[in-house]
Amino acid sequence: MKQPVLNALGHIGRQTLGILAQWGRAGLFLLHLLPALPYSVYRLELLIKQVYFTGVLSLPIILTAGLFVGMVLSLQGYNVLVDFNSEEAVGTMTALSLLRELGPVVAALLFAGRAGSAMTAEIGLMKSTEQLSALEMMAVDPRKFVFAPRFSATLIVMPLLSLMFIAMGILGGYMVAVGWLGVDEGAFWSQMHASVDWREDAVNGIIKSVAFGVLIAVIALFQGEDAVPTSEGVSGATTRTVVQSSLGILALDFVLTAVMF
Amino acid sequence: MSALIEIRDLTFSRAGRKIFDGLSLDVPAGKITAIMGPSGTGKTTLLKLIAGQLSPDSGTIKVNGELVHRMSRRKLYDLRSQMGMLFQSGALLTDLNVFDNVAFPLREHTDLPEVLIRPLVLMKLQAVGLRGARNLKASELSGGMARRVALARAIAMDPSMIFYDEPFVGQDPITMGVLISLIKKLNDSLKLSSVVVSHDVAEVLSIADFACVIANGQVVAEGDSESLYQSESPQVQQFLKGLPDGPVPYHYPVAAFGDDLKTEAS
Amino acid sequence: MTRKQWIEIWVGMFVLMGIIALAVVAFKVSNFQGLQERSSYQVHALFDNIGGLKERAPVKLSGVVIGRVNEIKVDPDTYFAKVSMSIYDDFDQLPIDTSASILTSGLLGDQYIGLNVGADDLFLKEGDRIELVQSAIVLEDLIGQFLTKFADSGE
């Protein structure tokens, strides 16, 4: 009778300890990585390469998704606002939703799936093919050569992608509201311009996206480095990167929203 | 005999399993030393301990008379620039081509202009016979070629010692022959000290000046290849001759077969 | 052109696109004014109820933003709400009998100050008070009035 209960408790305990141990390792990993970060400025060519792999290659998905999200927001907003005779506010609504929440959050979720997972897989593969050990043996610090450029690139790329997502979203919203639903163009822009605050809405959105960038970079790089160096280990680590960053982004978004707005 | 690497009473365990238990070993300078032993005896781990990538639980490892695991990172990196390591998989950087892989340590550690790096790299590639493959990507190489490129990279900085981690695993007889003669040739022409970790007995003993066999976390036999073949130790005999049963049992530890059948039936 | 150069070109384009997006968000979408505020002059008005008006709310003339609310406080003499606003210098020819009302964009939108120009020959200048005001419409008051009327008519 007692045994299954004890087993279950033991299982929960083991899982918890496992998670805590992993968080501890991730914290140490970040702590050891920080001193290497300034190095990515000296090795600009490595940074540029990573901006290309994480940023430029994420462009198609970010731009397309931004366009559609903006179009949907505009369409839904119009359907609600038209009942109150204030369909001109659709621009404001689209812009505010995108700047405050959807831009940073959706761009970060897509980035985690597109670039974060690729980063984990790449580093896991470098680990399993002993490339990281080989760098160590050649007296090249993998933190400076492999991790720092990827971390810095993510910090640069994330807010830029998020801004592009927002701009595309507003364009999509404009196309639907003005081009299709016949909202007055002047009212669309002026209402938006009048109600959206630079400091309050735009800057806070950008701060959010930088915070998400840090989160994704830490999780993706740590999971790659922590991966069991086999093909199952690497694929498991890739999955964990996507799951943990997605949940982390949403949880962090709640905290940041509570603090900011 | 001057010892390049001195290992004394080394113990090391990983995941609760004791891998080395009081291992002592001297690696002579300027010779080819073979470290042999059955799979899972931690031969690769031993190389990582010597290179300072892992730290022992107790015991000491000295290279050139200095304790490896007490060194600062900077000093350790200085030491490693005198070491070359050939990994089992080659461990070439996958996003670079052959030429850039060999040039990598030179570009990272020296300020040499490209005009000087080019002839240096071509020289190393010539030594391993792959000067013609310089523009291939790392992923386009066969296993044997990847290992030869890795060897060219390992000697790019003109190290004084070089470690080979299972260089013969999974290679066809021709590649194996190429690698054996390369190891011998490099050791003699570059005045290196080489350490070859392997379980391919015949191949490695054909070039080794000095060899040792590791089992149960200790050195069970050492000497030149002649004396190893004449060793009385049953472990050495089983390993060298490849007998299926002996001190290393054929069966994974298990209850007597008859008992097992009975329990299963009841 | 080598692969490395292509990567650099793409990254350059990427950063440029990011900056353009930032500019769109800053100037087209939000009210980013740069480091310096547009030069403006101050006027104020007294309201008996400002409803949900906030600082930095827009001041509009015929729907065009011509200034911002920069301070809201209670006037110690009259106990009315004293709303100070800056009007951009481009709009320095507002007649002195211009009226100010607190309006709402749409039914649920933010509140702003709407100006209606008068016909006087004198213009508002720095420190003037807008005399003609219409306070915010408070929904509860409206409903209260409606209910009272409804009850009265029911008798």
Image (cartoon, coloured by chain):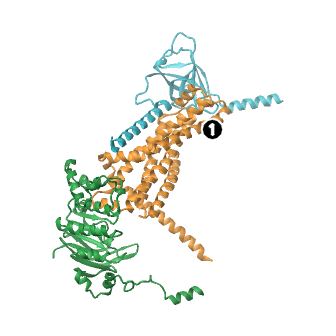
| Residue at x 71%, y 32% (from the top left corner) | C143
Q: Position of residue A104 (x, y in %)?
A: 49, 43
Could you say whether the residue bearing mark 1 is in a helix, strand or loop?
helix
Q: Is residue B8 above or below residue C27?
A: below
Residue matched to label 1: A76
Does the rendering let one see residue C101? yes
Picture quadrant of residue A195: top right
Q: Hey, which residue is sitting farthest left in the picture?
A: B1
Which colour denotes chain C? cyan
Q: Residues within 10 Å of mark 1 (few under 14, many from 20)?
A: few
Q: Quadrant of residue A220?
A: bottom left
Is residue C15 shown above or below A149?
A: above
Query: Which chain letter matches label 1?
Result: A
Q: In this view, does C63 lie to the left or right of C35?
A: right
Colour applied to chain A: orange
Assign the C terminus of chain B to one quadrant of the image: bottom right
Most foreground residue, A130 or C93: A130
Q: Using the rendered view, name the quadrant where residue B71 is placed.
A: bottom left
- Left or right of B73? Residue C85 is right
- The answer to whether any part of residue A100 appears in the image is no
Residue B170 x, y percent position in the rendering: 36, 69
Q: Which colour represents chain B?
A: green
Place of residue B247 in the rendered image (x, y in percent of width and height, measured from the top left): 36, 86
Q: Which residue lies furthest to the front in this view?
A: B174
Q: Looking at the picture, how far across and down is residue C105, in whole percent?
A: 60, 29
Q: What residue type is labelled 1?
A: Gln
Q: Is residue B178 left or right of residue A158?
A: left
Residue closest to the far top:
C121
Between C56 and A136, the one nearer to me in the picture: A136
Residue appearing at x 50%, y 32% in the figure: C29
Please state, as top left, top right, bottom left or bottom right, where the N terminus of chain B lies in the image.
Answer: bottom left
